[in-house]
Image (cartoon, rainbow, N blue to C red):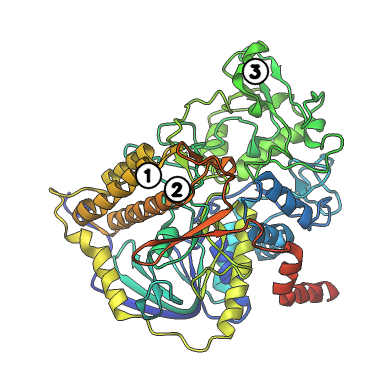
Amino acid sequence: MQDNLRWPYPAEVDKTIRMEADVLVLGGGIAGCMAAISAAKRGQRVILVEKGATKRSGAGGSGCDHWESAASNPCSGVTPEALLQAMLDDNDGYNNGISHYIECREGWDHLLEIEQMGGKIRDTEDEFVGAEFRDEKTKLLFAYDYKNKFTIRIWGTTFKPAMEKECRRLGVQVVDRVMVTSLLTEGGKNGAKCIGATGMHTRTGAFYVFSAKSVVMAMSRPARVWLFSSAHPGLCEFRPLQCIGDGHAMGWRVGAEFNMMEKSVRAEFSSAGRSFPPYSAGNNHNTWYAASLVDAEGREIPYADRDGNLLTSVSQRFQPAEGQHFFMKGGNIEQAKYAYDGPETLPYETLRKQGYKLPFYADLSTLPELERKVIWGMMVGQEGKTNVPVYKNFTEAGFDPERDVLQCYGVGWTSAEFLPQERQLFGMPGGFMNDWNLMTNLDGLFVCGDALFSSNCFGHAASTGAYAGRKAAAYTADHGEILPPDEDQIGRERRRIYAPLDADPLEGVSWKELNEAVSKAMQNYCGEQKRDELLQSGVELLARYEREIVPKAYAANPHELMRLLEVFDILTVAQLILQACLARRQTCEKLEFYRTDGDGQKPAPFICIRYDGEKVLRREVPLDYAGNIKENYEKYNQDYIAEKAGEVGA
């Protein structure tokens, strides 16, 4: 029995492994893989570091059902400029015009690139011949807007293994099971050039020091800040358990600048005992769009177009309204100006007055055969959050979409009404501030995917990852030597991360206890309504946790230590969010930011903050800081434009 309880991996906490590369990519998700591939194709030596296993890691690792912004595909009726402008308009400018234009303009290019790696993007088996959403010439399948055809249905479960294989084919050094813990800067100084990172092997505990000419931050957005259940630690929020914003925390500690970190929305998805797992019920949004919904008595709930006109056929649900150029569904959560009003957008009180009775159900049986088949067989089957827990398990349990209905949830009738203080960094949240090279304020530190402010979904991650990788490669070509890391900075980090292994478990706290404490503090002091007294109380409480609780936190093995270091990063992110909230003085509805002590003035533009090691610095940035989007993109990407033109010519 005692042998069965022994840690099965060698103990290497005293071992230090040093590695060097031209380009160091932190995070092996969709964005990180594309960054590594892009840099390696341009002749750079690349190291990719991933906390999990790159083949299936990250928020998109287990699959995705649609590529939302392929505006330049041959069937598209929308230009990249029009699609980007819609995104900006719908958020009143509080959006990342640079990264989303990259997504809109280059998305199709990188989808083709992934296809060449082995990812499946076409109906090559002719499974959906004759469907309204299929283009017979290209065999592409489209979602949502069937007229304008800029969102492509994909077999996303095939993508990540293909990317990982391509990384290895190109000679990328893939370092799996290593948690990155800090960024290294020139001379160990705050705000200085980024020259590497440190990490810890999550099974052996070995310490890693990575040195590079440039670094690409491709790690996830934060999670588990407001919501955490110690009883359900593997089911906390929309993204995987390990995706908690480590990169945000380590960037904040060395002086990186952040934007829109005050934005948080009331929880939409949480499986920590608060709701169904995402897309496990027929809510007819994104993956399930546009499923028919019926009430408890089988009465169908109508769809209406943008102007409130009731739709009389399933086909109409996929067409723009009269006078409407295009509409968006999925991908971007906040697209009401361009999207249909479906049953899920109607307040329950409105439906109740019309005689509809709870519960509601998704009824695929009334859809045309190929529409039913593409929702249940492909969209639900390829979306990573539903592939196994919903499609596989429900099918094996006997669910038949031609006969059965599936209980749904939606706005106004959710199975769990989340409280205003239960928030998430969801729907284009805050992140690292970037320039046209996707570089941060730290020289040599590039950023992509969910690490960017106002990040989006699968296509955004892949496109910005490829872009950041090629910009990092170009930067590296102009910078000769790898700078030596500061040994004092490395020593401090080593002592910080291994201290919990020596703590007394009888007197300290576990990672679960600390995570729950941080989440409760954020619920109490950084909920929906903000005022200085509340926010300052939160700042003081979290500072007390850092002084008094963190030194007592304990871990019994490298895996527990990884979980604890994640919670240390969650604590840092919570402090960053509180500081961002203090910096914004006025209510701003588009950021879902509400001040009870505001001055009633017009909301400020972007408010960027950074920590210089002693104090928080704040600056305002115009919403149109990117300038003329198309002109500046072409100014900064002449090499890529020429490269694409050469491919077409060839």
Name the residue at 32% across, 55% down. Answer: 568
Q: Residue at the spot x=68%, y=58% of the render?
A: 103
Judge whether residue 69 can be spotted in this image: yes
Q: Secondary structure at mark 1?
A: helix
Query: Are the residues at dot 1 and dot 2 in contact (C-beta closer than 8 Å)?
Result: yes
The residue at which mark 3 appears reads as: 350
Q: Give the crowd class for mark 3: few <14, some 14-19, many >=20 residues within 10 Å.
A: few
Estimate the x, y position of residue 227 in percent, counting from the top left. 40, 40
In the rendered view of the protein, which quadrant contains the C terminus? bottom right
Query: Badge 2, how many Cα within 10 Å: few under 14, some, many 20+?
Result: many
Quarter assignment of residue 79? bottom right
Q: Which residue is located at x 75 percent, y 34 percent? A: 371
Whichever of callouts 1 and 2 sits on the residue coming sooner in the sequence is: 1
Which residue is at the front of the view, 640 or 290? 640
Residue 58 x/y as whole percent = 50, 55
Query: Which residue does the image show at 63% across and 55% down from the upper left?
Result: 623
Q: Secondary structure at mark 3?
A: helix
Compared to residue 513, the image places residue 439 above or below, namely below
In the depicted view, which residue is nearer to us: 440 or 58?
A: 440
Going from the N terminus, do you reach mark 3 or mark 1 first? 3
Residue 605 position in % (x across, y down): 59, 53
Q: Which residue is mark 2?
A: 581
**The disc labelled 2 sits on which kind of residue?**
Cys
Q: Residue 327 location, x and y as percent? A: 76, 41
User: Which callout, 3 or 1, points to the residue nearer the camera?
Assistant: 1
Q: Specify the quadrant of the image occupied by residue 328.
A: top right
Secondary element under disc 2, as helix, strand or loop, is helix
| Residue tagged 1 | 535
